[in-house]
Image: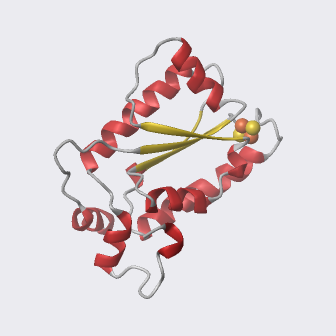
Amino acid sequence: MAEAHIVQQGATPAAAGWEPRIIAFLCYWCSYTGADAAGTARLKYPPNVDIIRVMCSGRIDPELITTAFAHGADGVMVCGCHIGDCHYISGNHKTMARMPLLKRTLVDLGIEPDRFVHEWVSAAEGEKFARLVREVTERVRRLGPLGWPQRMRERGVGCGMSLEPWGA
Ligand code: FES
């Protein structure tokens, strides 16, 4: 209930022609290859996603995600190999532990949970990747622009905290 209240207060009107900007952090060995498979199979998904390739989803520090939001992302995706398939053995176990905590923290920082998605995507799951991008883009489109630094200032979240390191 409180979450819905926060979300409503933070709604930013979308300017004409606004398009959601989604940043996707993909692990090299599975999810990036899955995205590549989607392209090779000519599966259609919205062009709203900018892909950042990392060697392992375990490399994705939560700070990378908050930085993406602070720099203008309206939504963020994190994708890695399925459990048991990580090329660095336990990298995705770290991801699995971090991401639910991060999601809860994002809510405290005024970011709707639907703006953040964490999923496992294998090299063979091009269709899953394309579907995820379609779903996330539509969800974020319904939420509207995030404008996170401004939203934080308006709410007095992190009073006195400098947003400079995040480009705000
Ligand atoms: S190599 Fe893909 S999650 Fe670790």
Quadrant of the image containing the C terminus: bottom left
- Quadrant hosting residue 72: bottom left
Pick the residue in front: 21 or 102: 21
- Quadrant hosting residue 152: bottom left
Q: Quadrant of ligand 1?
A: top right
Quadrant of the image containing the N terminus: bottom left
At horizontal 58% and vertical 18% (from top left) the residue drawn is 37
Pick the residue in front: 139 or 36: 36
35 sits to left or right of 91? left
Q: Is residue 83 visible?
A: no
At horizontal 81% and vertical 35% (from top left) the residue drawn is 87
The location of residue 83, given as percent across then percent down, is 71, 37
Q: Is residue 135 visible?
A: yes
Give the residue furthest to the bottom. Answer: 160
Where is 17 relative to 112, above or below?
Answer: above
At horizontal 83% and vertical 41% (from top left) the residue drawn is 89
The location of residue 149, given as percent across then percent down, is 38, 69
User: How is the protein colored in the picture?
Assistant: secondary structure
The location of residue 17, given as percent across then percent down, is 20, 41
145 sits to left or right of 105? left
134 sits to left or right of 19? right
The location of residue 44, given as percent across then percent down, is 40, 19
Where is 4 relative to 129, above or below?
Answer: below
Where is 123 relative to 96, above or below?
Answer: above
At horizontal 45% and vertical 59% (from top left) the residue drawn is 71
- Quadrant hosting residue 137: top left
Where is 133 relative to 58, above or below?
Answer: above
Give the residue furthest to the top. Answer: 41
